[in-house]
Image: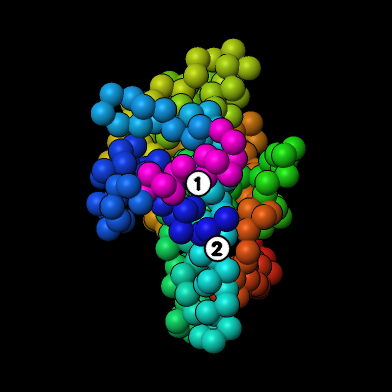
Amino acid sequence: MDLRDLRYFLKVAEFGHLGRAAEALNLSQPALSKCIQRLEDAYGVALFDRAGRGIVLTEAGELLQERYQLLAHDLEDIRTQVSSFRKGIAGTVRVGCSASIAQFFLPRVCRTLREKAPDLHLLIRTAMDDVLEDALKAGSIDIIVRPGRPVEADGWIVSAPLLSDTVVVVASKDHPLVHEEPTLAAMSRFAWVLPTPAVSTRQWLEQVFIAAGYPAPDAAVTATPLVAAPFILEETDLLSFMSRQNLSASTGIVELENPATTLRRQFDIVHRSRSFLSPAVRYFLNVIHQEVAIEKQPL
């Protein structure tokens, strides 16, 4: 297989139009058509169907696009990996994580990297877990840190425990519940600042209240991530459910202690099992595990 054909095929799939793809590649349209024909002859199936003035991938074409995208990322990984032997610990590590990881854990990692590997750059992306997993699977992210759960049966990822976290109910230090027992009944009198319903921590909290016979918490404010929540709590009588680490970052909020609303969770560090790990990525993994071992404290 000619690697140029791979690149040309992906470009045609991206544009859905031979003319525009040819222009982007600085090729003639007949030359690009011959490339597609070579691939179709090699695989013995049609890769595109005509759709109006453009073209769309067939089912076989969609499969080929998915596999070729992974291969393209792996080829880039190889190029980066070989180049890294010449440069030393350098390059870019693409990390996906939750806002709480980015806010409370990665700064310590960044400090170590700046001291020991100043030519290594981080590209940090915060998003929902499913979005990050899709990006990891597509090869546009090297590593993600996500809440721990069983590894998928198809074996496309490598997952290892990283650190623990405790999520608790919090409120302003002047909140009425600070001076009374924060039972579920008492909490149910107040509205909340919560992430979107798709977030697992909110789903867990809702089930706690529903299982005890109370309505699910009323989200007066919905925000993802909950970066602004501590400031909102300081100005209102709203409650929220967030990492205990927020208490060390804000003097205006306190934990409302109740074992029923205390969630202990684990975060895993995850990368693709079939990807090449460049020296930069391997170094980052070593640093992040060292930071966890040194700190020996929950997220």
Question: What residue is disc 2 on?
Answer: 75
Residue at 58%, 29% in the rendered image? 204
The percent position of residue 84, horizontal first and vertical second, equals 54, 80
Report the Cα–Cα distance between label 2 and label 1.
Answer: 21 Å
The reply to whether the magenta stretch includes residue 37 is yes
Give residue 163's quadrant in the image.
bottom right
Quadrant that contains the C terminus: bottom right
Above or below for 85 versus 17: below
Q: Nearer the viewer, residue 257 or 18?
A: 18
Give residue 234's quadrant in the image.
top left
Few, some or many residues within 10 Å of mark 2 (<14, 14–19, 20+): some
The reply to whether the magenta stretch includes residue 36 is yes
In the displayed structure, does residue 82 sit left or right of residue 249? right
Residue at 51%, 32% in the rendered image? 46
Residue at 36%, 49% in the rendered image? 32
The percent position of residue 120, horizontal first and vertical second, equals 47, 77
- Name the residue type under label 1: Arg
Q: Nearer the viewer, residue 82 or 226?
A: 82
Q: Is residue 297 visible?
A: yes
Question: What residue is disc 1 on?
Answer: 38
Question: How many numbered callouts?
Answer: 2
Above or below for 291 versus 62: below
Q: What secondary structure predominates along the stretch shown in magenta?
A: helix
- Name the residue type under label 2: Leu
Q: Secondary structure at mark 1?
A: helix
